[in-house]
Image: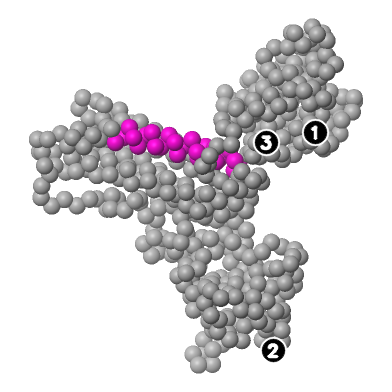
Amino acid sequence: MLCGPFSLPASLQTTGIQSPYHYGFMLTRHHHPIAAIATAPGRGAVGIVRVSGKNIEPVIAAICGRALQPRHASYLPFRDAQAQVIDQGLAIYFPAPHSFTGEDVLELQAHGGPVVLQLLLARCLEAAAAINPVTGMACLPGLRVAQPGEFTERAFLNDKIDLAQAEAIADLIDASTETAARSAARSMSGEFSQAVNALLAKLIHLRMLVEATLDFPEEDIDFLQKADAQGQLLGLQKTLASVMQRAQQGAILREGIKVVIAGQPNAGKSSLLNALAGEDLAIVTPIAGTTRDKVTQLIQLDGVPLHVVDTAGLRDAQDEVEKIGVERAWAEIHSADVVLFLHDLTQQDAMNYIADDARIAATLALNLTSKTPVIDVWNKSDTASPAALANASAGVVISAKTGAGLHALRQQLLQLVGWQSAPEGVFMARQRHVRALEQVDEQLARAAAQLRSTLPALDLLAEDLRQAQLCLSQITGQFTSDDLLGEIFSRFCIGK
């Protein structure tokens, strides 16, 4: 047995490597109180002005005329510096640490007119800058307008939420389908974080075994074998696979799928866009080259957002405007998740048409990576000859006019991107989460190879597990660069 004093390395004493923020280090701007309008621009029934910081009672007294009972809504007039009423509404005070940001928070709920809210925000800044006659200093020094996402950032820095939960807040706001909103709500409530932390706990326990074996090499008992380290690692990999599958589904929900419809003029690309969207979005005429620029529409397919792009017909155009449209079509194709290559079944006896289709197919194969699937879609089945239908090669046969075959096309689209219909327990995730989990999977695969070897290199095994822990900790922000934090929170709206 192991004996004598044994202490875990610092990296094993918590569930992850902590960000400098969690050791009490915060940038200077994070010490300043902040204020912002927390509702969307424009007119509305209700608008909210939010203030967060330490010791904000002087601002409360200046605007509300009295102290507020914590966590109780008080209906009262909001007054300016001359005691004139700006508006009447609800004021709620949340003392630290029992608030969204972990600081003292004041929310002023007023009528949602832009001018009213701007007046309230200006009054908050004015009240903070007013000189206290007793101290001779500003009532609330440094109060400023919040930057995008700064309220949520402070909730993260004050350990009210982790980074995955913070991102889920933005994802819930941006959700374009009901399924995406429900998945974002799961992540916001901590479901994704709990899954990641459970993985971390198992990983740290395995690291403890390896580190202990490295610290006590003279032990005559094969500690790793006795502790079934290989079995623990296998269980960890299985759990990781399940989390990865749910995260990949969540990433599809968040990002959506970019589907580009490509093909020769008059193949029915605009008609297909209209059929998928269920409304007339693109102009449809028998004239070749009608579509000169891309037309994009967001539609929902089994809860998944689909960004469908109709493009100009691919041909050697003579018209200068059409040439630009063809160039833009190829640019859209290069950035597509899936390309629908549309063929006209009524032109399958025209040798020139077949040759042009073949040239487009060759160009697609040359310019697209193997990760970008191309679906051959054979259109106009309602007017095609029996011979043309019989000769249609692999793909999906449809009629954009009658809707025949569209269901099969939709299902193939979802299948190609790996979407499982109505999955249970999917949480919203981002591509950075998926990449981090994939890196963890790679590190664990290396660790498993070490354990299977006759003479495992324990130092390499320990390093593989350490790297896996670092990658996993990045998801919840336990180990996160300042640059990444800035990138994430800068995409939030002001006031959130």
Mark 3, Cα crowd under 10 Å, few <14 / some 14-19 / many 20+, is some
Q: Report the span colored magenta.
A: 232-255
**What's the residue at 56%, 49% (across, down)?**
184
Query: Helix or strand or loop: what does disc 2 sit on?
Result: loop
Label 2 sits on residue: 82
Callout 1 secondary element: helix
Residue that numbered label 3 is attached to: 301
Q: Earlier in the sequence, mark 2 or mark 3?
A: 2
**Residue of label 1:** 274
For residue 423, the mark is: none
Q: Is residue 55 above or below residue 430?
A: below
Q: Which residue is pictured at 74% across the width and 67% down the height? A: 45
| Mark 1 vs mark 2, CA separation in Å | 59 Å
Q: Which of marks 2 and 1 precedes in the sequence?
A: 2
Using residue 283 as the reference point, say whether residue 428 is left or right of it. Answer: left
Secondary structure, magenta segment, majority class = helix
Please count the marks in the image.
3
- Secondary structure type for disc 3: strand
**What is the crowding at mark 2: few (fewer than 14 residues within 10 Å), some, or many (at least 20)?**
few
Q: Nearer the viewer, residue 149 or 306?
A: 306
Q: Is residue 359 visible?
A: yes
Three-letter amino acid code of the residue under disc 1: Asn
Q: Residues within 10 Å of mark 1 (few under 14, many from 20)?
A: many
Which x, y percent locates residue 332?
70, 33
Image quarter (top left, top right, bottom left or bottom right) of the C terminus: bottom right
**Type of amino acid at the residue the image marks with label 3:** Leu
Image position of 411 (left or right of 72): right
**For the view shown, which residue lies furthest in the bottom direction?**
134
Q: Earlier in the sequence, mark 3 or mark 1?
A: 1
Mark 3 vs mark 1: give the one in front.
Answer: 3
Task: Tell me the distance, in whole angstroms, between the alpha carbons under discs 2 and 3.
Answer: 56 Å
